[in-house]
Image: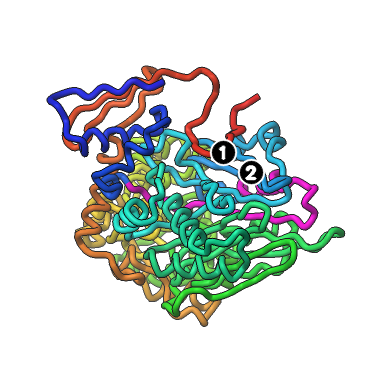
Amino acid sequence: MTELHVRGPSRSFSTFRALLLQHRSQLQISGLAAFLSSSPPLCSRTLGQVSDLVCGILGLLLHDASVDAAPEISEGLSLLQHRGQDACGIVTCGPKGRFFQCKANGMVRDVLDEKAVAKLIGGMGVGHVRYPTAGSLDHAEAQPFYVNSPYGIVFAHNGNLIDSPPLLQYMDATAHRHINTSSDSELLLNLFANNLQKTGKFRINEDDIFTAIGGLMTQCTGAYACVAMLAGFGIIAFRDPNGIRPVGMASRRTNAGRDYLFASESIVADALGFSEWEDVKSGEAVIITRSGVSRKRVAAHATFAPDIFEFVYFARPDSVLDGISVYRSRMAMGDALAVEVDKVLKERGIIVDVVIPVPDTSRVAALNLAQKLNLPYREGFIKNRYVGRTFIMPGQQMRRKNVRRKLNAMALEFSGKNVLLVDDSIVRGTTSEEIIQMAKDVGAKKVIVASCAPPIRHSNVYGIDMPSRTELVAYGRNTEEIAEAIGADLVVFQTLPDLIASVRQFNPSISTFDCSVFTGEYVTGGVSEEYLHRLESLRADNVKNKVAMNPREGQSAGRVNGFHTQVNMVASGNGADDTVGLHNTWNIS
């Protein structure tokens, strides 16, 4: 039971409703849906809409329905843990089309333990790992999502929509579907479900599904790679018309027949013994049942533009995305960066003694750079592997605090030396500043930083949580000013043409990459200055942390529409979760 207190003068309906929406996961929901779906329209809550940022998605269908898919899905999600460390979940489909669910905030190893996985029955399922989103403290934001009508659908998504407000208005006013969270994934799920509902059929077929997904692609704009499951039918994957976010498929021959896998990265297929990895094409939908595989392009032709930042930072080096080895592309980035570094160092008359990577992503590039410049390569930072990636920590203070928890500088590699630190990119500059100071604290004479990526000066609207331009250290600064801001003696950036060439050389058929964080050019269109300002105000760290849960006192305090609010939480004490629709086996003995 949750007690809701509104402090201050009397409030309007819209203000009170917004307050309820902000804290809906902590309220008893019986009868609340009808209240929140009444006028004014649901689009009033879009101010709280959030994307599902750089996540990992997975779908698995085993030919032998008597074998449970959950153990392998859990293993696969652990291989995608680098894509999201905030929450994870699995939904499987068992006998008679019944769904079994386990999802919660936390790492895969903690949420999906042996006891939890054992309760997930069925030979096919969908899994998800989620990137941290500050303020998302309830389990309701964890994926996969579920709707019972029509046909029973489970859905997992990686990406971000840029036209959520009109879609939410459509869901409320026309489709009459309640969106229970602030997740784009639930919105996409309900768009898909509503399109399927229009068939009016007792049983649907592959053509109906293709039509529904094609309709979805005409309705929404943004980046999305999705995996879905229909009860008793099969698994589905589709990718946005520009192919910005990755997803692929593979198969495995067994004695019973052929198993099929969808995943964000090919490493999952390699580790689970699948072969014939193939990327889902942009604008394509793939439907897999135990009877076979159906594929169809369901969107009009658009520029294929995969996100180049996947190769710079997010993807594992042992993955292959869109026919490009992430490892080989990072080697090429190091080679190209070496040329630029050599030129700048000679211009400045600086002699470097040692090349040291910033663990872990930059190691491959740093080694190639060192070899090309004939410089010694050393591991100067020792990493504590039990602390998460600081770039995907939700708040600036948490990022700063975790840098020194995560890394320790070895004085013997820094003391008295001019050090060239190689990093994959410089985003907010918080981590770079701390690392440079650590190097100087143990005696480095000069610290030069080389970035495998060009300066990041623009918001990402396709699923990377760097929305506020003012948070980016390169915004409004030249190279010298960036160096001063992070405390470096010199900063050298990879040029954009060299970065693109480093990746594209391994698949020349790709003519364009999404480089919007470097150029401010958005391949989907529809990104106005007004949209960027709204996005920045929603996701800037200071806004995201306005409502912060105090676990010791069990209270959440903040401001809604300018008014002070307070929610006092009374624990149910029965281990019940915050999700809606499916029984959640997480933390249930």
Residue 261 part of the magenta segment: no
Residue density around tag 2, few if under 14, some if 14–19, many if 20 or more, within 10 Å: many
Residue 310 appears left or right of 295: left
Magenta-colored span: 49-78
Seen at 59% across and 48% down, the residue is 127
Outermost residue on the right side: it is 255
Q: In screen coordinates, is 266 left or right of 34?
A: right
Q: Is residue 106 above or below residue 94?
A: above
User: What secondary structure is found at the residue carrying circle 2?
Assistant: strand
Please state which amino acid type lies under the numbered disc 1. Leu
Dot 1 surroundings within 10 Å: few (below 14), some, or many (20 or more)?
Answer: some
Q: Can you say which quadrant of the picture contains the N terminus?
A: top left
Q: Amino acid at mark 2?
A: Phe
- Please tell me in which quadrant of the rendered image residue 21 appears: top left
Residue at the spot 19% in from the left edge and 23% down from the top edge: 7
At horizontal 61% and vertical 50% (from top left) the residue drawn is 126
Query: Residue 51 lies in magenta, yes or no?
Result: yes
Q: Is residue 199 visible?
A: yes
Residue where numbered disc 2 is placed: 99
What residue is disc 1 on?
582
Q: Is there a contact, CB below 8 Å, between mark 1 and mark 2?
A: yes
Callout 1: helix, strand or loop? loop
Residue 356 visible here: no
Can you give x and y, in whole percent of width and height, for residue 474 in the image?
A: 26, 57
The residue nearer to you, when weighing 225 against 166, is 166
- The colour scheme is rainbow
Q: Nearer the viewer, residue 2 or 548?
A: 2
